[in-house]
Image (spheres, grey):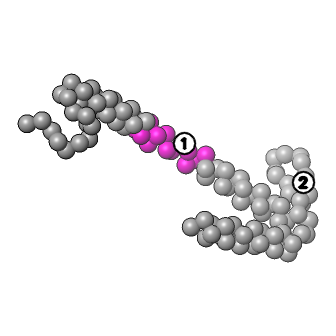
């Protein structure tokens, strides 16, 4: 799996470099209500737009996952509490291993 990830990363890096070399023409970017003009290479503008889209998607994904993270935290706490309770019950009943199958009869 690690080799596949490395291979895909190299392929993407090569494609990005080829894209950058092929699209070096300068473009002027103006955002209408603002008086600023920005001159960038075409590849820089496109890569910037892709990065900003990726960043917006990651922020949205993180914000929508808040409920699931809270649920997971509560379930982990409940699991720890139940394991502690099981260990206490095993200690009181004389079991050596709370997960063992040799329950007293």
Q: From which residue to which does the magenta span run? A: 59-72
Q: Main secondary structure of the magenta part?
A: helix
* Label 1, residues with CA under 10 Å away: few <14, some 14-19, many ≥20: few
The numbered dot on residue 38 is: 2
Camera-nearest residue between 89 and 54: 89
Q: Secondary structure at mark 1?
A: helix
Residue 89 appears in the figure: no
Residue placed under numbered mark 1 in the picture: 63
The numbered dot on residue 36 is: none
Q: Secondary structure at mark 2?
A: strand
Left or right position of 26 against 57:
right
Cα separation, mark 1 vs mark 2, equals: 32 Å
Q: Position of residue 52 (x, y in %)?
A: 71, 53
Of the numbered discs 1 and 2, the one sitting upstream in the chain is 2
Location of residue 84 (image quadrant): top left
**Which is closer to the viewer, label 1 or label 2?**
1
Quadrant for the C terminus in the image = top left
**Residue farthest to the left?**
105
On whether residue 68 falls in the magenta region, the answer is: yes
* Label 2, residues with CA under 10 Å away: few <14, some 14-19, many ≥20: few
Q: Position of residue 31 (x, y in %)?
A: 82, 52
Could you tell me which residue is drawn at 25 percent across and 27 percent down? 91
Q: Position of residue 38 (x, y in %)?
A: 90, 54
């Amino acid at each position: 799996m690690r080799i596949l990830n490395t291979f895909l990363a190299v392929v993407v890096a090569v494609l990005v470099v080829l894209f950058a070399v092929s699209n070096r023409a300068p473009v002027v970017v103006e955002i209408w209500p603002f008086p600023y003009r920005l001159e960038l290479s075409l590849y820089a503008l496109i890569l910037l737009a892709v990065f900003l889209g990726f960043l917006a998607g990651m922020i949205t994904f993180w914000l929508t996952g808040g409920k699931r993270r809270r649920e997971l935290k509560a379930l982990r706490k409940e699991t720890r509490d139940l394991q502690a309770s099981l260990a206490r019950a095993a200690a009181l009943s004389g079991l050596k291993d709370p997960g063992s199958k040799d329950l007293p009869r």
